Image (tube, rainbow, N blue to C red):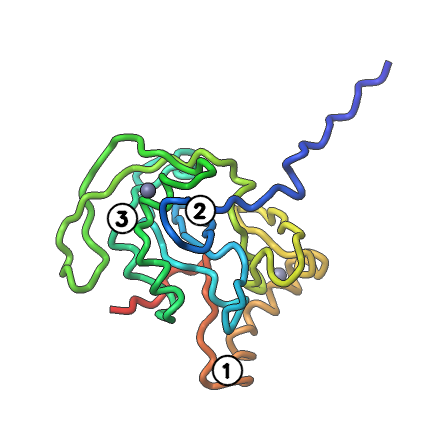
Amino acid sequence: MSQPTTPTSPSSPQAEIIQLCSRHFTSIPLSLSRFKRQWFLTFPRTYGLPDPDSQRIVCALNSPDYSTSSEHARNHFWLNPSCRSQRYNPSDITTKHSAVSPIHLLLDSDYPVARLTGRIRSEPSNDPHDEGKQIACYEVEVITSEDGLLRQCYYCLSWEAAGKSNTRFCPGGNDIYWCSSCEASGWVLSTIRKLRLPDILTWSDGDEKPRDNLYSPTRLTSTG
Ligand SMILES: [Zn+2]
Ligand SMILES: [Zn+2]
């Protein structure tokens, strides 16, 4: 008798993006995203924002911690409450939603997303007004599977759940994801396009804001 083929996990290609929402607060649902050691609150859908595909990052949740193993960092982070001042784009909408405390969002979600490990440590505040003072940070364990995180295409910077598409992005190796059209083009062509992207944006519109980018969070501008 031949060995039965390994059944494909029902959660792999079309897993749901987890949404953080709670009856304890009024907020549109948010989602979680991660690249390597940094975690973000994101908008799981476009919600009709003015520039739908370029404004999904609500805030970073932590400063990447290189003292832990990458395995540990895949589902743990030190929630730095000052990170929400690194809001990407200070539109009224994002300001309103980042006013919800990230810790409350994470722990109060009706769908269980995260829990505190109980460990607390101090880290410098990222808020420029705090002038580097130490603040308390809480270690968070993410208890949902990796499949539930919202993904961004590394190459064209598009996000999942844009428009009517529910197609999930596939892993492209080294913790990156890519959309189906970049995957179809292959990484060589997609890399060339990615490198040319800033030039194209400059030509098309001088006032174009940089697109938010999980993979290059240093480009997140502090709103000061
Ligand atoms: Zn509550
Ligand atoms: Zn893409």
Residue wearing tag 2: 21
Q: Residue at x 36, y 39 (%)?
A: 107
Q: Quadrant of the N terminus?
A: top right
Instruction: Indicate the position of residue 5 as horizontal and vertical percent values.
Output: 78, 25
Residue wearing tag 1: 202
Instruction: Please report contact status of discs 3 and 2: CB closer than 8 Å, yes or no.
Output: no
Query: Which comes sooner in the sequence, label 1 or label 3?
Result: 3
Q: Quadrant of the C terminus?
A: bottom left
Label 1 is placed on what type of residue?
Thr
Instruction: Indicate the position of residue 95 as horizontal and vertical percent values.
Output: 34, 65
Residue wearing tag 3: 80
Judge: label 1 CB < 8 Å from ligand 2. no
Q: Residues within 10 Å of mark 1 (few under 14, many from 20)?
A: few
Label 2 is placed on what type of residue?
Cys
Quadrant location of residue 10? Answer: top right
For mark 1, give the secondary structure: helix
Q: Is residue 100 above or below residue 2?
A: below
